Every structure is written in structure tokens, then in C-alpha cells.
Amino acid sequence: MQNWLTDIMNDFGYIGIAFLIAVENIFPPIPSEVVLTFGGFMTTQSNLSITGVVISATAGSVGGAVVLYFLGMQLGVERLEKIVGRWGHILRLEKKDIHKAQGWFDKYGSWTVFFCRFIPLMRSLISIPAGMAKMNIILFLVLTTAGTLIWNVVLVYLGASVGNSWQTIVDYMNVYSAIVYSILIVLALIFVHLFIRKKKK
């Protein structure tokens, strides 16, 4: 994978990074953590700059989010379920992922778009319910860009700082993902427990 990413970034530069991140948002073959940390590492091995990598990655991420936003506007939950049911094994998605993103947006509103940019998988999917709810496009772009920019700056700088050890950051991000998902599961169980108690009363 390292050779493949090196070739793309050497041959296409910032455009290649923007493309990789945009594709990752819509169809996640490679996690953004890998592209961003490796992009940071490449700033120590090529003419790429940290600022350029951050800007191009942010542009690609926002572009991918906008595609999903308009997809959400055009498709309802039932049609999305059919798509995921048929192509989910390729898209690495399940029907419950769609409902989870929808539930978060319904419960926490527009700010979910910002905070979900720091949660793996949800960072892309949250754009769909935002589109379904016909969230104000300007507010969507502002919150998406802000959350994405923070995420990108942190990972690109980390990748540049550790150099050849950039893969270590990816390993830590996997641990981070596991911790986040564990916390979310615990919170969901607590919510269910409180809901059941309230119903019994």
C-alpha cells in the first residue's frame, strides 16, 4: 500500500490527495487516517507541504461530504437500505450504520455534523441524514469544513512529526476507534436501560 500511495502522491500531488480523501468519504477503501498520516510523512520526503496537504485533504473531504449530502436529499431511508443491502459488502456498510447516523442527527441536530467528523465511519455517513433533513447547506459546509480541518491538521502534523513511523499513528487511531465505539455502545446500553425504566414507571 505504501508504494501505491507514494506513486499517487508523487504523480498527482495535492490533486491525488484530494481525490483519495474524496473517494474515502463516499466509498471507503482506505481509511482517511492512513492517507492523512502518510501524506504528513510525504511532506518530509517530497515537495509537498503540510499546509498544502491539509488544504487539499480538506477540499477532498468536503467535496465527498457534499456528494453524500445531496444523495441524502434525493434518497429516502428505504432506498438507502436497498442500496446498502445490495452493495454494503463492497461499501463496508450495514443498514444499522444508516439508522445510527440518522438517529444521531435527529437527536443532536446540526452540531452532530461537526462532532461526527472525529468519529470513524460516522464522519462520512452523517452527511446523508443532514441531506435528508435538508439542513441549511451553508451551515452544513461550515460545520463540515471546521470539523474536517481540525481532524486533518492533527493527523497530517502527526504524520510529519513521526516520519517513517507514520504507521504507528494509524495503529493508535485503530485503538482510538475501538475506544470510541466501546464508549458509544456503553452509552447506548445506558440509554436503553433508562428508557426501559421510564416505561415501567
Image (cartoon, rainbow, N blue to C red):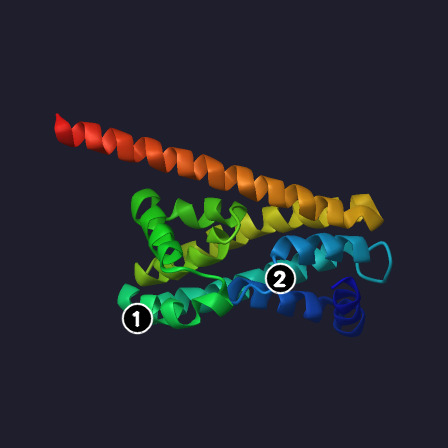
User: Which image quadrant for residue 85?
Assistant: bottom left
Q: Secondary structure at mark 1?
A: helix
Which residue, given by chain and number where applicable, does mark 2 sit on? 30
Residue at 45 percent across and 61 percent down: it is 93
Q: Alpha-carbon neighbours of circle 2 within 10 Å: few (<14), some, or many (≥20)?
A: some
Image quarter (top left, top right, bottom left or bottom right) of the N terminus: bottom right
Q: Residue furthest top?
A: 201
Contact between marks 2 and 1 (CB within 8 A): the answer is no
User: Which image quadrant for residue 191?
Assistant: top left
Which residue, given by chain and number where applicable, does mark 1 sit on? 79
The percent position of residue 73, horizontal first and vertical second, equals: 33, 67
Q: Amino acid at mark 2?
A: Ile
Q: Secondary structure at mark 2?
A: loop
Q: Alpha-carbon neighbours of circle 1 within 10 Å: few (<14), some, or many (≥20)?
A: few
Give the vertical position of 7 relative to 115 (above or below).
below
Residue at 36 percent across and 66 percent down: it is 72
CA gap between label 2 and label 1 equals 26 Å
Residue at 34 percent across and 34 percent down: it is 189
The percent position of residue 187, horizontal first and vertical second, equals: 38, 34
Give the vertical position of 91 relative to 145 (above or below).
below
Q: Residue furthest right?
A: 45
Residue at 41 percent across and 46 percent down: it is 112
The percent position of residue 176, horizontal first and vertical second, equals: 59, 40
Q: Amino acid at mark 1?
A: Arg
- In the rendered structure, the answer to whether residue 82 lies left or right of residue 89 reads left
